[in-house]
Amino acid sequence: MTPNLHTAKARRGDEVMRGTTQLDAEDALPMKNSGSMNIWSVTAMGIGAMVGAGIFALLGVVALVAGDETYIAFLLGGGIALLSGYSYAKLAARYPDAGGLAAYFDEAFGKGKLSGTLSLTYLLTIAVTIALVAKAFGAYAAPLLLSQPSTFSINSFATAIIVLLVVLNIAGSNLVGKAEVLLVAIKLIILALLIVAGGYGMVTHGMLTHATPRIFSLVSSVGLTFLAYAGFGMMTNAAGSVAYPKKTIPRAIYLAISLVMLFYVALAVIVVGSVPIAQLSHNADTAVAVAARPVLGSAGYIIVSIAALLATASAVNAWIFTAMQISLSMAEAKQLPLAFKSLVWRKGTSGLLLGIAAIIITVNVFDLDALARIASATFLISYMAVHVAHWRLVVQTKGSRWLIGTGFLGMLAVLACFLWSTAITQPWSLALIAVFILGSWLIESVFHISSGHPAP
């Protein structure tokens, strides 16, 4: 166990023994962590995870479903994310644990097969997300750097960025935070330039044509847009590396989601207004860079492609950091094999290296759309479970049941429409989602039996 995680768990245990009334008196006390991350580095990490997976990897895919209402889909997705962020913020303030979501499941459901299955589902979702965003990195890098890009070159670039950023994360969280601040600042400046230039062009040459909203398509597309926001959840895993997690983590969550929502809505308007849907259908994986060409020319295409590389790289960076924290927390809770806390070099474990190898295989087997649908569905399921966990712990967190229930029902409606749409358009993706969830349960069941843990 790392010192940061050990400190967080020790403090949590002490609070439980002293009672919840002691918590308020401890809110202002810092957690004595070396190389602590501040609100800006945590916020940057969340923005890095969201923007990389959201705009650059998914905007084109969402536009093919939602059409002119793409910006509405991102707006609705942001609302769902803010409600989910409320539960995360309350839980993070009450349980400032580096295990994040996994720790909340343990508190709400006990350290048994249910909490282990939910945590493993989330961990595997992160693995798919790393593969998804790395694939998007390769999709932008190959045409930018090679005259004749191919599937092999896209997968090669994706594999290379994963390996590089695993080494960076193993080196330490302080480096991760510094890298995120720099990467996020650069890409947001470039995206702001695209928004301004695109907005001017739309005002000059005409605005979007407004079609009658297709309610079912719109709501089902929100399932994909939620994946674009799901990165906020990983900010709670930085709790073990933050000096004042009970104040810093909630503030960082709200700030990151709000800023990202503004960028998403603005960019959705610009992209859909600048590029015909028919053209986006042929360039869905690189939609933002394609949208830059009409308003900024070839130079704009190159600049935005570079921003896409920075964005997707920072997202992979953030998700790897999260996977390391959750896998270590689950291993300490005996919900994963000891290989996930057996150090090989610095913060790298043998279990992590095996997991990265599996992610690299996934990158080379599945296409971006399949990865997006699997990750979207399992993120929705995982975050719905967070609402349930918060409901069970609402007395301790002093949260609002009304907000928790609203968030859960909204997410349930989005998930239902998304799964129905997937069943109609890509039934094989729905089968993969089912295998994914069932596989998590089976793996956790086998591990509990082999380790002698009784199921609750």
Image (cartoon, rainbow, N blue to C red):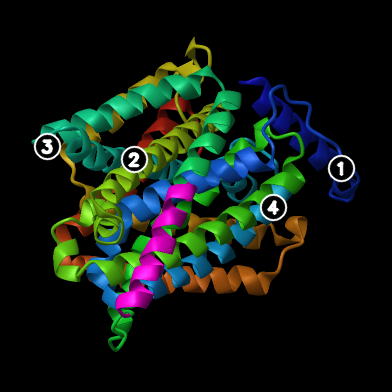
Q: CA distance from mark 4 to mark 2?
A: 30 Å
Judge depth for marks 1 and 4 and give the one in front.
Answer: 4
Residue 310 drawn above or below residue 415: above
Nearer the camera: disc 3 or disc 1:
3
Is residue 414 found left or right of 92 in the rendered image? left
> 74 or 188: which is nearer to us?
188
User: Is residue 419 in view?
Assistant: no
Helix, strand or loop status at disc 2: helix
Residue 150, image quadrant? top left
Quadrant the N terminus occupies:
top right
Mark 1 and mark 4 in contact? Answer it, CB < 8 Å: no
| Residue 297 vertical position relative to residue 420 in the rendered view, above or below | above
Above or below, 338 relative to 27: above
Q: Secondary structure at mark 3?
A: loop
Residue denoted by label 1: 28
Please tell me which residue lies in front, 443 or 244.
Answer: 244
What is the span of residues highlighted in magenta in the rendered image?
A: 188-206
**Residue 306 badge:** 2
At x 34%, y 39%, the residue is 309
Secondary structure beneath dot 4 equals: helix
Label 3 Cα neighbours within 10 Å, binned few <14 / some 14-19 / many ≥20: some
Residue 327 point in image, percent of width and height: 49, 31
Q: Earlier in the sequence, mark 3 or mark 1?
A: 1
Discs 3, 2 touching: Cβ within 8 Å:
no
What's the amino acid at mark 3? Pro
Tell me how far mark 3 sits from mark 1, CA to CA. Answer: 54 Å
Magenta-colored stretch includes residue 152? no
Q: Is residue 401 above or below residue 90?
A: below
- Total count of labels: 4
- Ranked by sequence position, the earlier of labels 1 and 4 is 1
